[in-house]
Amino acid sequence: MLDYYGQAERVAFAYAQRPREYRFVPGYAHVELHPTAEEGDHVLYEIVGTNLWNHAMPLPRYRTGDLVRLPASWGARELEEVALGLRTFPGVLGRDSDILISPDGVQLTGIDHFQRDVANIVRIQVIQEAPDQVRVLVLPDDGYSERDAAQLLLNVRTKLPDSMRVDIRRADTLERTEAGKIPFVIHRPAVRELLRRVRSRGAAA
């Protein structure tokens, strides 16, 4: 049995035969890893891929928005080995936009784990109203109960620091963008500005 990672654009493909041991498939695409942020002893890299076989629709250096977390001690050699499928990496964290940021500027990943093992939920949407405030909208399924809400809150609190307030609400509809899409994570203006400042500092460093 294989677990695999890919996208509709098909600019990168990876698989794992064991947990947290993914490899990019060489020859499927040209993969690059672009640093986006530092997290203590690790660095977040965005997966950038160029497809090698779609002659009808070439996508050179397509920015997937997907992130991987790798040790900060790894240099150019180790990163090249990951991109070529010669070295394993622990997995893909999700899209760059699907993160939250703490009041002290730490970028928080793994937001897609909030709903894990919670029953009776159709879908959730995470809205960061302010650096210290997160609202989770829940589209409930039949049977959704306070017990499910409590498990969801526990999952959220496991990922977020105590400095961030969490509000979980039932909803009949979720927020849409002007294009009609329903994003998983929404950042309000103050949060987007904090993200911009943090990433600017990281780029300058």
Image: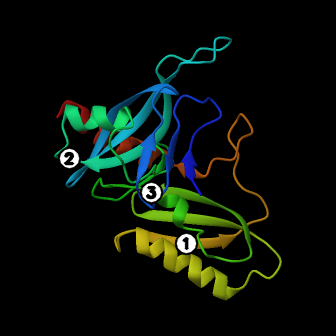
Using the image as rendered, state which of residue 67 and residue 177 is in the foreground: 67
* Residue on which the image places disc 2: 72
Task: Decide which of 169, 144 is in the foreground and name it.
Answer: 144
Q: Which residue is mark 1?
A: 167
Q: Which amino acid, mark 3?
A: Ala
Relative vertical location of residue 176 with respect to residue 84 in this rendering, above or below: below
Q: Position of residue 187 (x, y in %)?
A: 51, 48
Q: Are marks 2 and 3 in contact (CB under 8 Å)?
A: no
| Residue visible at 54% across and 67% down in the picture | 114
- Of marks 2 and 3, which one's residue comes earlier in the chain? 2
- Which disc is residue 130 wearing? 3
Q: On residue 190, which mark appears?
A: none
Q: Secondary structure at mark 1?
A: strand
Q: Quadrant of the C terminus?
A: top left
Q: Position of residue 186 (x, y in %)?
A: 56, 50
Q: Is residue 125 above or below residue 72?
A: below
Residue under the point 70% across and 35% down:
178
Residue at 30 percent across and 55 percent down: it is 106
- Circles 1 and 2, Cβ within 8 Å, touching? The answer is no
Gap in Å between the C-alphas at discs 2 and 3? Answer: 29 Å
Between the C-alphas of marks 1 and 2, the distance is 34 Å
| The N terminus sits in image quarter | bottom right
Q: State if disc 3 and disc 1 touch (CB < 8 Å).
A: no
Pair 1/2: label in front = 2
